Amino acid sequence: MPAMIKSASMLALGSACASVWVVSASEFVQNGGFGEGVKWWSIPPSGLYKFENNGGYNGSQGLVFRNTDVKKTAPGYPGQALKLKPGQQYKFTGRVRAKKSSAEGAEFKVFMLIDVKGADGKWMCEYWSETVSDTSNDWIRVNGKTSPLPPEGVTFSVRPIAVGAGEAAFDELSVEQLETDPVQAIASSVYRDTAWTGKVRFDAHLAIDTGLTPVSAFKASFAFPDGKGATVKVPAESFDKLGAAITIDVAELPMGAYPISFELRDLTNALIGSKTLTFTRTAERPARKVWIDEHNRCVIAGKPFFPLGFYHSNITPEILDIYCKGPFNCVLPYMSISREQFDNCHKRGIKVIPCLTTFHPGAKYCPIKGIETQEDADRAVIARVNALKDHPATLAWYLTDEAPVSELPQLIARNKLIKEIDPDHPTYSVYCQIDQVRNYRLTCDVLGTDIYPIAAKPVGLASVFARTTQKGAGGGPIWQVPQAFAWKWFGRTGENSRMPTKAESRSMAWQCVANGANGVIFYCFHHMIDDQPRADFNRDWEDYCAIAAEISPFIPVFLADPAQNATGYEDGKTSGRAWIKDGETHLLVVNETREPVKTGLNLSDKYASINPSLDKVEPVLDGDRLSFELPGLGVAMFKLVK
């Protein structure tokens, strides 16, 4: 739950446009050593954080956290407001000492973060440092990096944080501005940058400091070979402070593998930044066991597949017997299960998403001993992939779980390595940094975000996460992760720590599908069965099996071709998605709220009849206008017949 970075800042434009490359080593944190006590800092009133003499590094005054209650959580965290610049990248670091409580059930995490709020004062996103839980009473330095800060960011803060039961101390916190590459990445809309028909969209991800220079001061263009020895250079069809894009018919591109490049220049034609990817045009679809098609569907041996499953830890025969009581078709086990366990899953019709998230130096649960360097980790990954890539139960490789953007170079390199040694299976990664999704686009083939709102936040976040994730993925495939656990299992107390109800879990799953998900994988089975009485698990598992049993009959619809969606959805209340199967249009509509919603939609065509299913609704069809009322958290699937 992972080259020098450049930044181009443009000075004010005069008669000529000159680009100035700057690196600022300015110190942004005041009293980062806490020698002046609370000055410049806000400290929560919980009493868990205190300034202590000899609490810092080398006997200086430091900020100390102490909590001995495994059930107590800190209501708030220390922080200091910073004067940072939207569009720029920053490094943050600090010394940390941590000691986890020895009490049974204790969990402890110590880290730093920078958070961002918008003009309305609402949280937008955050960037984490490395996380530690116990440093054996030694002081160590933890580091973090931001991606380019969002252009809409207004308020920025740095926070030293301890979560759980234990003792921690902080000292020498600092933040420095880094050079920020104005061209962050280039990506294509097709699976593994390979196409044989249709159209392909190329996106350049940008980080331009528009506070200094407007977009109109730049020129954006893409270049590709024409197949006759010349290069075709065309301006971007769309261009703003976040990105530039162009869509090309594959038939206009030559056969073979070659570079597609993007350039950002100023008005004097001076190069500001560039990126290149290798694109391949083939005569036909390459032969692969598993791939992602042009409609973002997972395809196994030529047949489309909609992943519906759970995270778990280990897959024993006993667990598999319980798991197969529901109509689930895949599982994501955190443990490195054996080939025999893969065999058992295959016999039961269950696909496996093998986990590689812990194959890193220093990883707490790394399954291989002796991994001390990245080279050690890569060798272990290669061995694991080669041992299982031929197994018929293998669906995709799970590469990373909520890794911070500071690990992007390693994440992108790991994805590249997997694709080189196994062209037959996609890679999958999940993140919680919902407003940073586009930064992770090159880390995997399939993106996902985890939605854990129950019970402190609106259940409608499932829709928001799905829409935001697909946008960040460039419209590509997403497998979403709804909540199937109680926050009390992780130390939270009160009403907001409860398990989602059946209605809430059902709604989150359907919201994911209605807003673009091509797979749904709940988190998680192992906590549900391990962290509560078996009677409670049995009740909850029965609910999730019932939810899956409701979804499963509609999977053939999800795997049909997309149809033009209806319009007129009410923002924050309703959303939906449409498919066409056997000549009939199927329209899925969800109510994202807990209150009934009376609404109407404009259809893409006129229809003669309508057949609703799922929740009871009484629709009124008037040509191309559909009116109905959905109950709170309601779901309806309309079959429209011309």
Image (cartoon, rainbow, N blue to C red):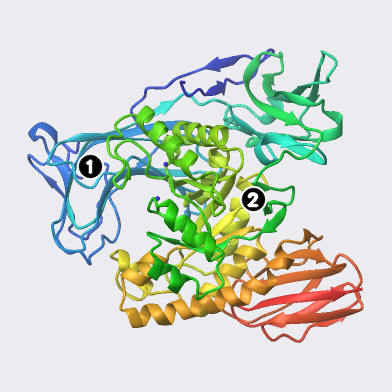
Sequence-wise first label, 1 or 2? 1
Task: Say if 306 sits above or below 129 in the image.
Answer: below
Left or right of residue 141, residue 624 in this image: right
Q: Which mark is residue 477?
A: 2
> Of tags 1 and 2, which is closer to the observer?
2
Residue at 26% x, 60% y: name it.
74
Q: In terms of secondary structure, where does tag 1 sit?
A: loop
Q: Which mark is residue 403?
A: none
Task: Answer with left or right where residue 290 lies relative to residue 504.
Answer: right
Type of amino acid under label 2: Pro
Tell me the residue at 72%/30% (across/down). 280
Q: In the image, is 580 to the left or to the right of 290?
A: right
CA separation in Å, label 1 and label 2: 48 Å
Q: Quadrant of the C terminus?
A: bottom right
x, y percentage for residue 181? 54, 25
Q: Amino acid at mark 1?
A: Lys
Label disc, if present, on residue 39 of the rendered structure = 1
